[in-house]
Image (cartoon, helix red, strand yellow):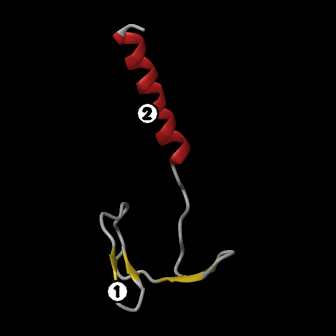
Amino acid sequence: MSNITLFRLLLIAFLLNFWISADETDWDAGIHNTEKLSFQVETFVAGFDVPWGMAFMPDERMLV
């Protein structure tokens, strides 16, 4: 397989990965129920489109 063909296949796989994994879910503030657990979303600061970190609190809460 030539380098150009391999590059094209990798590029297509890379782009498909982003297209398939794109998630448009917009979690509004409030309590959300899933099959396994319930969680509450609270907005402290608005205007951030992409969370860049997570931290877990001692009481098992998560900060994003």
Q: 9 and 1: which one is in front?
A: 1
Residue 45 appears in which quarter of the rendering? bottom left
Looking at the rendered structure, the kind of residue marked 1 is Met
* 27 relative to 8 in the view: left or right: right
**Where residue 34 appears, x then y in whole percent?**
65, 75
Between the C-alphas of marks 1 and 2, the distance is 34 Å
* 26 relative to 54 in the view: left or right: right
Task: Please state the total of marks drawn on the protein image.
Answer: 2
Please give the residue where the numbered disc 1 appears in the rendered image: 57
Q: Quadrant of the C terminus?
A: bottom left
Secondary structure of residue under mark 1: loop
The answer to whether residue 16 of the structure is visible from this angle is yes
**Where residue 59 appears, x then y in whole percent?**
40, 92
Q: Quadrant of the N terminus?
A: top left
Residue 37 appears in which quarter of the rendering? bottom right
Q: 23 and 13: which one is in front?
A: 13
The image shows residue 4, relative to residue 50, as above or below, that is above
Looking at the rendered structure, the kind of residue marked 2 is Phe
The image shows residue 39, relative to residue 59, as above or below, that is above
Q: Confirm or deny contact between disc 1 and disc 2 (CB under 8 A).
A: no
Which residue does the image show at 36% across and 60% down from the upper left? Answer: 50
The answer to whether residue 31 of the structure is visible from this angle is no
Please give the residue where the numbered disc 2 appears in the rendered image: 14
